[in-house]
Image: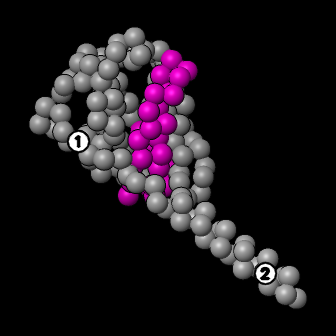
Amino acid sequence: MRFAFTVLILTIIIVGCEKEATNTLELSRAFESNGYEFKGVEGKIGIQNTTLKAQEYQKVLWHFWGDSEEIKGNFRVEGTHLVTGEKKPILLVNPQGNETTWEYDNHYTQPNLGADKTKPSALWFDKSGIWKLDVILDNSHFAEIIVEVK
């Protein structure tokens, strides 16, 4: 009985610590470039600081700062819902539906708002919550952005 009670207490502590660790991830910080506010990693990657909503089409222009040799290749975004741990594609294939894909081709657009390159996209989140967006360029992890989806 004493052993079972000890195991139960340790399990509660471990589970509580894991949930706390998940919930303590901070949202990506806001920063400014050319008079516009972004969320992301200043000097590396950002999206305009607007409200992201679940179950809605959202047009997003990704802004990249840095060496043009690093900002190339296929553009992949892996979205992870931080409460459920589910990893999902969030890039929309077509704005008329909710079919998603993991990546877009390597076409980047001109510099904009102080960024060295940009990449247009459409996003679709299936549920609200805190999402980690891992951005992979040319098969290499480039950066991550943590956002709240309403």
Q: Residue furthest left?
A: 35
Q: Gap between marks 2 and 1, in whole Å?
A: 48 Å
Q: For residue 122, which numbered disc appears in the image?
A: none
Q: Position of residue 29 (x, y in %)?
A: 30, 47
* Label 1 SS: strand
Q: Which part of the image, by quadrant, shows the C terminus?
A: bottom left
Q: Residue furthest bottom?
A: 1
Q: Counting other residues with Cα less than 10 Å from the Cα at mark 2, is it few (<14), some (14-19), or many (20 or more)?
A: few
N-term mark: 2 or 1: 2
Task: Judge whether residue 90 can be spotted in this image.
Answer: no
Q: Quick check: is 104 in the magenta stretch? A: no
At label 2, the amino acid type is Thr
Q: Nearer the viewer, residue 140 or 107?
A: 140
Q: Is most of the magenta stretch helix, strand or loop?
A: strand
Q: For residue 6, which numbered disc appears in the image?
A: 2
Residue 106 placement: quadrant: top left
Q: Residue at x 26, y 19 (%)?
A: 116
Q: Position of residue 100 (x, y in %)?
A: 52, 36
* Label 2 SS: helix
Residue 47 placement: quadrant: top left
Q: Residue at x 65, y 68 (%)?
A: 15
Q: Residue at x 18, y 33 (%)?
A: 33
Residue 61 placement: quadrant: top left
Q: Residue at x 30, y 43 (%)?
A: 39
Q: Which residue was labeled with disc 1?
A: 31
What range of the chain is rendered magenta? 123-150
At label 1, the amino acid type is Phe
Task: Judge whether residue 64 can be spotted in this image.
Answer: yes
